[in-house]
Amino acid sequence: MARARSFDLDAATDAAVELFWRQGFAATTTRQLCDATGLQPGSFYAAFGSKQACFRAALDRYLATQRLPRTPSPEAVRAWLRAITLPARRHRGCLLVNTAVEGPNLDAATRRFVAQRLAAMESFFARCLGDGPDAAAGATQLASAVVSIHVLARAGVARPQLRALADGALSRVGLARLDDS
């Protein structure tokens, strides 16, 4: 008979989010995950199965905790871009985008997982823009702007430049600038 867990899986997942976000996927070892989560290797593998599965759980947790709009609308696009350019955002970028940049260092399953999450963001933007002929192209432009903003924020680019990038993306898809809120 299996023993009951003597640890909080949510707390362990949160600790994994922080470690992956700080160090990146490739630079994070299973030993470091065990140390960060407070789990012994056997408990870590029983809970997550592998570093890759732990990462997928951590990334899903991270995405679920972001204060981003969930209901598609043109205003949701503006709210998303406004949220990622706020000064309160940590200059660690976005865990999803940071991991996508690590692409060549990812195993195939994790690369697919990250690509699916990026595609979901683009699909959300397409739904926000409606059924028009330019919705798909506009969604690609918006997703590209989001990725760019996160990478530049992590590099320390100032907020006015990030807002200008967001405003340019909004303008290209026919939406009002953030400054015109």
Image: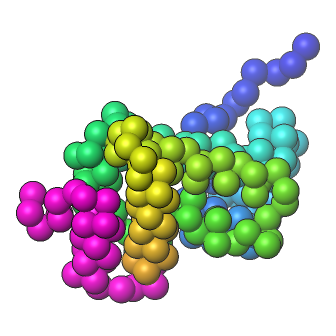
Q: In the figure, is residue 136 to the left or right of 33? A: left
Residue at image point 67% right, 54% down: 115
Q: In the figure, is residue 27 to the left or right of 150? A: right
Tell me which secondary structure the magenta stretch mostly adopts.
Answer: helix
Residue 45 visible, this angle: yes
Residue at image point 32% right, 76% down: 165
Residue 44 visible, this angle: no
Q: Is residue 141 magenta?
A: no
Q: In the figure, is residue 70 to the left or right of 22? A: left
Image quadrant where residue 129 sits: top left
What span is in magenta? 154-181
Residue at image point 79% right, 64% down: 106
Looking at the rendered image, the quarter that the N terminus falls into is top right
Q: How many labels does the image show?
A: 0
Where does the image place residue 148, in percent across and percent down from the top left?
46, 74
Where does the image place residue 90, in percent across and percent down from the top left?
38, 69
Q: In front here: 44 or 116?
A: 116
Where does the image place residue 15, in percent across and percent down from the top left?
59, 52
Image quadrant where residue 85 sits: bottom left
